[in-house]
Image: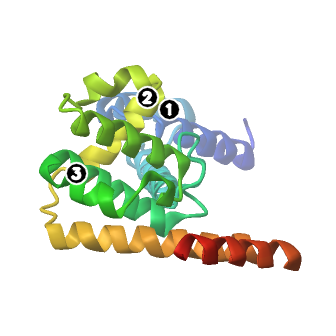
Amino acid sequence: MESADGRVAYLTGAAELLATLESRMEQEVYAGKLAEEIGIDRSAIMMQVDKNSKKRQKQQQQRQFRAFQQQTAGIGDDINPDKAKNLRAASAEEALLAYLVKYPDRAEEIYGRLPPEKFSTSFNRRVYQVIMGKIMDGKDYSLTDISGEFSVDEIGAIARIFAKHHDASATWKDAQEYINVIEEEHAKLRVEDVAAVPTQSIEAYLAELKAKKK
């Protein structure tokens, strides 16, 4: 460490290390010892430490923002893996679930229009079925009451859905819009399913639909 380059490299590494310390006092103390060791002013070391600290904070904010974007988009969601490819439907489903637990008196009306099979994500469909079943049977439907139907991680995911919409003052008009979105997205999935089916199967499918309409 006798050369100038050696001292600079040592100082750079030490400043990066001090930047990882959360305590300003600790940074100051170690910077003072380092200044005596190298023979430079402590303020010069602290300037470098502060520069590195700001860089670390910016990187952390960027990581948090990327994580937030991924969470919002459903990327890496092990509980509801269908969410990433059905984001619009999943968002409406979650909003409707939160509305349902706030306004259970609308349960029968909602269920009459929106059977579980119209949900695009299987996890939200399960939550809908369990909560709706509890309400229809006149039973309690809190997280504790439904915990026997889900794993600990799944209950945590449901809790986050409810917490996300806790302060939202959704109206019945909003709930109807959620239902509209869920129906629209379900219809899109049906079209995609039909597009992937051979022609002869499509004809059979249309015949089946025609029979049901009679």
Q: Determine whether, in the image, residue 87 is placed left or right of residue 98.
A: right
For disc 1, the marked residue is 34
Residue 6, x across and y down, in percent: 73, 42
Residue 86, x across and y down, in percent: 55, 64
Q: Amino acid at mark 3?
A: Ala
Along the polypeptide, which appears first: circle 3 or circle 1? 1
For disc 2, the marked residue is 30
Residue 30, x across and y down, in percent: 43, 28
Q: Amino acid at mark 2?
A: Tyr
**Residue occupying the far top of the picture:** 148
Specify whether residue 112 is in view.
yes
For the residues carrying marks 2 and 1, which lies nearer the camera in this image?
Answer: 2
User: Where residue 107 is drawn, which disc sits there?
Assistant: 3
Report, in whole angstroms, how far the alpha carbon at label 3 lies from the one at label 2.
Answer: 63 Å
Q: Quadrant of the C terminus?
A: bottom right
For the residues carrying marks 3 and 2, which lies nearer the camera in this image?
Answer: 3
For label 1, the crowd category at 10 Å Cα-Cα, with few meaning under 14, some 14 to 19 and many 20 or more, is some
Looking at the image, which is closer to me, 201 or 170?
A: 201
For label 3, the crowd category at 10 Å Cα-Cα, with few meaning under 14, some 14 to 19 and many 20 or more, is some
For the residues carrying marks 3 and 1, which lies nearer the camera in this image?
Answer: 3
Q: Amino acid at mark 1?
A: Leu
Looking at the image, which is closer to me, 40 or 205?
A: 205
Label 2's element?
Answer: helix
Q: Determine whether, in the image, residue 142 is placed left or right of residue 129.
A: left
Residue visible at 54% across and 56% down in the picture: 83
Residue visible at 19% across and 28% down in the picture: 140
Specify whether residue 99 is in view.
no
Q: Is residue 193 above or below residue 166?
A: below
Q: Are marks 3 and 1 in contact (CB under 8 Å)?
A: no
Q: Are marks 3 and 2 in contact (CB under 8 Å)?
A: no
Along the polypeptide, which appears first: circle 3 or circle 2? 2
Q: Determine whether, in the image, residue 6 is placed left or right of residue 58.
A: right
